Amino acid sequence: MQFLSSMNSAKLSFDRRLPMLSPNKYMLKALVVSAILFAANSAFAGTGSVATMDDPTHIMSVTFSPIHLVNPVVEITAEFKAHEQWGLALVGGAGQVTAKDDILGDVDFSVWEVGGQLRYYVLGDFDHGMQIGGEILYVNVSNDEIDTSEGRFSGTGEGLGVGPFLGYKLATKVGFTVDAQLGIQRTFLQAEAEHTASGTSAEEEDRDWGPIVNLNVGWSF
């Protein structure tokens, strides 16, 4: 039936949006983060094996992702100092993304995400250093009112990403903080679209590899 074709189109449209950023935006973020990491390496090379700030006092960093605001999605990361070389971060966000589809046009979806990171500062410390770590992030995308010529559909997409990263953080004495990370993650995606009137639904699952690209600014306390 024709509405099944429309339903599949709806499903695929938000399935493609699960990462929340287009490949071009990922590439831009990757280039910026790479430049920051390169500069950090140069700084370490010029000052010795470890670059630290005098009298570090920060025990928590709260940052946000400016690039996510384009969607707009507000993503906030709160990192807590577990040790001079260890940090534990919680990630949360919510907002809206717009999927572009040849049949449906622009469709808005509500999105929320939650996750965490474990970080070890191989050079420097919690205030100023290069880190290695792991991230796990869950993303949920949904819209219960997708109107088409064949009726109304609801759509839900879920994604889970897990992987390692290399990063660098600089927290100044006054508190201003820049936090950048690059890595790779294994992604697990699931999407479902349902025709509201008939209850007919279609599902799709996918597993893939993708980048971890984080560029945050904020404040340390």
Image: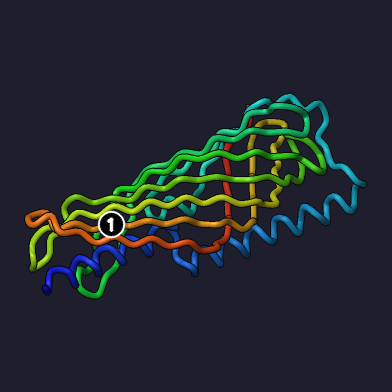
Visual colour scheme: rainbow
Q: Position of residue 213 (x, y in %)?
A: 58, 56
Q: Position of residue 30 (x, y in %)?
A: 60, 62
> Which quadrant holds residue 196?
bottom left
Q: Position of residue 181 (x, y in %)?
A: 64, 51
Residue at figure coordinates x 70%, y 56% from the top left = 36
**Residue at mark 1:** 192
| Left or right relative to 65: residue 150 | left
Residue at figure coordinates x 69%, y 61% from the top left = 35
| Left or right relative to 113: residue 122 | right
> Which of the pair 52/151 is nearer the observer?
151
> Which of the pair 59/161 is nearer the observer?
161
Say which element carries label 1.
strand
Q: Residue furthest right?
A: 48
Q: Position of residue 140 (x, y in %)?
A: 36, 47
Label count reads 1
Residue at figure coordinates x 76%, y 59% from the top left = 38
Mark 1 crowdedness (10 Å alpha carbons): few <14, some 14-19, many ≥20? many
Q: Amino acid at mark 1?
A: Glu
Question: On the rendered image, what quadrant is the N terminus found in?
Answer: bottom left
Residue at figure coordinates x 50%, y 57% from the top left = 187
Please say if 51 is above or below 54.
below
Question: On the rendered image, what quadrant is the C terminus found in?
Answer: top right
| Left or right relative to 19: residue 53 | right
Please say if 48 is above or below 100.
above
> Which quadrant holds residue 102?
bottom left
